[in-house]
Amino acid sequence: MKICVLYGTETGNAEMLADDIETALSDDHQVDCANLCDVDPADLGKETFHVIVCSTYGDGELPESARPFAQSLEQNRPDLSGISFAVFGLGDAEYAETFTHGSIRLADLLKACGATQIGERMTHDASGDDMPEDLALPWITEVLATFSEQSKEV
């Protein structure tokens, strides 16, 4: 399967997790990894499954590197019908009102443009005991299995 792991980061944590996901999947899949600031939403390919890893910054805002991607989605409203994605949010639950809002915002924007979210959004709490990769790797394996099953049914 062709997979692209896209990350939005402010301090590098989302990039590190995206790299971990890329490494974990690369034995069985063709995987690329890119910063959201380097991606035009209109260029997302239907033949690729997209994994979005996004942190939250400040008062629930998108991190700096995800802002151009989000602005393009809002302003240009590209037709993303046929695009499938999963989303993993990084945040700190000590800020309960804005916890992982960056990933929520990206998922909502993608869906508003016609993309389909596969599986539930997974989140990591920086103030918790788990490492992000300990949650992300089993999650993405399950999401890809769900996507494969759904693709067979079509």
Image (tube, rainbow, N blue to C red):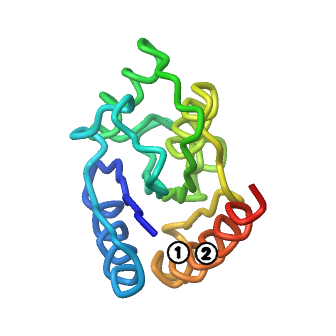
- Name the residue that disc number 1 marks: 136
- The image position of residue 42, as x and y in percent, is 38, 28
Residue hosting label 2: 139
Residue drawn at x 52%, y 38% is 106
Task: Determine the secondary structure under disc 1.
Answer: helix
Q: Is residue 9 above or below residue 17?
A: above
Q: Nearer the viewer, residue 81 or 122?
A: 81
Residue type beneath disc 1: Ala
Q: Image check: 29 left or right of 59?
A: left
Q: Do residues under tags 1 and 2 come within 8 Å of each other at their CB atoms?
A: yes
Apparent side of residue 102 relative to residue 39 in the rendered image (left or right): right
Report the residue at 51% width, 80% height from top. 137
Check the image and report above or below for 57 versus 152: above
* Distance from Cα at disc 1 to Cα at disc 2: 5 Å
The C terminus, quarter of image: bottom right
Residue 143 in the image, given as x and y percentages of width and height: 64, 69
Question: In the image, residue 68 lies at what x, y percent?
Answer: 30, 28
